[in-house]
Image (cartoon, rainbow, N blue to C red):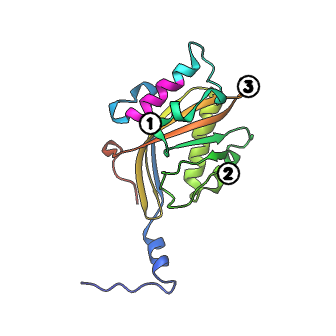
Amino acid sequence: MAIVPFPPGGKATALAAQSRNALIIRREPTDSVVELDDPLARVLANWRGLRGEGKVPPQRRKLIPEDHLQPVMGFAHIVDCSPDDPMNYLFRLFGSRVSLFGDQGFTKRRLAELPDAELAGRTATDYFNVISKGCPAFHKMKVRVGVRTRSYTRLLLPLTNDQRQTDQLLVCFNPRPLPELGDLPW
């Protein structure tokens, strides 16, 4: 067994040197939310029910978490997207079971405060696209931040205020293996 000495900074420095952040995001058609993503499919059906026949996203005030979000409790964020700069979008609620960042919660924090700049930038772009188009989006994702690696599907659902302006997002996650995305690059 080889003995590898730790660098002068100690074990934490060695771990930081070995791990690199990485990200794979693949956009999929919203209609491809399948049985493996049943929690997201149920939330999408609830969102479509609130929207009705129109094309305008539903109002946030009509969303009742106990009724409409039951399948994704703990795996959902509510994001305030009213700032002009997407990096300043604010997590009004950050899913309590989202573990990519360890025990670090992001409720009442901005996207710019996420611990990885590439992840924050790509997330801001995805959120901005959904807000500006007013249409849902579905993604398959594999992410590594530090020593934590997660794979999950993500559903982004726009919400409107009382003036029918799209200014919030409901972001839902379904953690599951995604072998079709391959391995994360080192």
Name the residue type under label 1.
Answer: Pro
Q: In the image, which disc is placed on residue 71?
A: 1
The residue positioned 52% from the left and 21% from the top of the image is 48
Q: Secondary structure at mark 2?
A: loop
Q: Is residue 123 magenta?
A: no
Name the residue type under label 2.
Answer: Lys
- Which quarter of the picture shows residue 54? top right
Bounds of the magenta segment? 38-47
Q: In this picture, is 5 found above or below 29?
A: below
How many callouts does the rendering have?
A: 3
Q: CA distance from mark 1 to mark 2?
A: 23 Å
Q: Are marks 1 and 3 in contact (CB under 8 Å)?
A: no
Q: Earlier in the sequence, mark 1 or mark 3?
A: 1
The residue positioned 33% from the left and 46% from the top of the image is 177
Mark 3 Cα shell of 10 Å, populated few (<14), some (14-19), many (≥20):
few
Residue placed under numbered mark 3 in the picture: 162
Indicate the position of residue 30 as horizontal and vertical percent values: 46, 27
Q: CA distance from mark 2 to mark 3?
A: 22 Å
Q: In this picture, is 4 found above or below 16?
A: below
| The residue positioned farthest toward the front in the image shown | 66
In this view, the mark in front (1 or 2): 1
Indicate the position of residue 11 as horizontal and vertical percent values: 45, 80
